[in-house]
Image (tube, coloured by chain):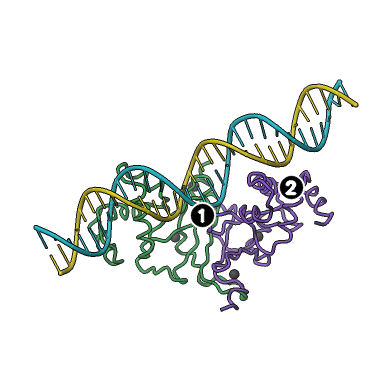
Chain colours: A green, B purple, C yellow, D cyan
DNA sequence: CTAAACTTTGCAATCGCATTGCATCCTTAT
DNA sequence: ATAAGGATGCAATGCGATTGCAAAGTTTAG
């Protein structure tokens, strides 16, 4: 757990408590997006609701973004430092049907996506599902 | 309830029971995708689980497709006659944040969408959210 | 035609994830 | 030191999805 985790929280105006530092640490170490359950699994000692509220706080302050990958459980991933969750920050996500991991496709921006002109667009959610690199190699 | 609803069910190898004909009728009359709750609201007399299983049956036989619009409740919409739910049949959906309706954007095909080449794509879910035509006019 | 076999339906129950209420503990500001 | 506000823990609830099981309906073999 690096010391700059605290700075990250402060930069988002989030009071750095022990729990929040731990959760941020987990999120930053994870390759894939985490559900509340995933997170709970990483700490033996933490209350589920506290973790839930931690994620909510992070989300409100745009430290993380939520991903609806259709599995029933919301996933969360760290936003990049520059991210404001504005339309130009949106990107696609990939969900592996085998290992159940969900990844940010940070380079797959959604801002330039064509949209129907009779609707007023506020958000776009693009989830691609299939086999991730790992799972498509292993047979 | 037209007589050809029965033929539609038969063409998908679904045994046409009274309940199924009624559900198909509701689905075909609806402009927007329906959740189980929506459907339940349209029938005073029907059991929730029967409706649930009816939708499952329809889905299995590709009469309807499911839409995960991020509202927590799955929505279902009739497939077009030619639809096989194969990749080339996939289309985007629009969810109105005001009236909560979810629509099929049947002309917005997803088959030619560019996808990351290190993943093996099986499905794509594109949900655009904002204000529908109606709701953006009314102010 | 009838009995067995299979399918559909209804009702009760359960599950998983999200969310809230409230009391307690901590931290910060007066 | 104390009051105020925020964070945490625990219990409870909400809600949508799903299952088990028995009753009712339908199809098929004999
Ligand atoms: Mn992401
Ligand atoms: Mn559709
Ligand atoms: Zn995988
Ligand atoms: Zn609308």
Q: Point out residue A29 in the picture as x, y percentages from the top left corner.
A: 34, 52
Q: Label 2: chain?
A: B
Q: Point out residue A45 in the picture as x, y percentages from the top left corner.
A: 30, 43
Q: Mark 1: give few (<14), some (14-19) or many (20+) Cα within 10 Å.
A: many
Cα–Cα gap, marks 2 and 1: 32 Å
Q: Residue at x 36, y 50 (%)?
A: A49
Foreground of the two, A63 or D9 = D9
Residue D24: quadrant of the picture: top right
The circle on residue A69 is 1
Specify the quadrant that holds the C terminus of chain A. Answer: top right
Q: Residue at x 47, y 58 (%)?
A: A67
Q: Residue at x 74, y 59 (%)?
A: B28
Question: Does A42 appear above or below B129?
Answer: above
Q: Which residue is mark 2?
A: B19
Residue A24: quadrant of the picture: bottom left
> In the image, C1: left or right of A121?
right
Q: Are marks 2 and 1 on the same chain?
A: no
Q: Point out residue A11 in the picture as x, y percentages from the top left corner.
A: 28, 67
């Amino acid at each position: 757990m690096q010391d700059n985790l605290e700075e990250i929280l402060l930069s988002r105006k989030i009071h750095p408590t022990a729990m929040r530092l731990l959760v941020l640490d987990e999120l930053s170490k994870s390759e894939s997006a985490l559900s509340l359950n995933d997170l709970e699994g990483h700490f033996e000692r933490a209350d589920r609701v506290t973790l839930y509220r931690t994620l909510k706080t992070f989300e409100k302050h745009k430290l993380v973004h939520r991903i609806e990958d259709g599995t029933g459980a919301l996933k969360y991933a760290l936003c990049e430092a520059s991210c404001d969750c504005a339309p130009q920050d949106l990107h696609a996500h990939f969900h592996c049907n085998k290992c159940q991991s969900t990844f940010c496709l940070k380079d797959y921006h959604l801002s330039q996506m064509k949209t129907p002109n009779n609707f007023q667009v506020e958000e776009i959610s693009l989830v691609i599902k299939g086999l991730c690199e790992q799972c498509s190699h292993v047979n």
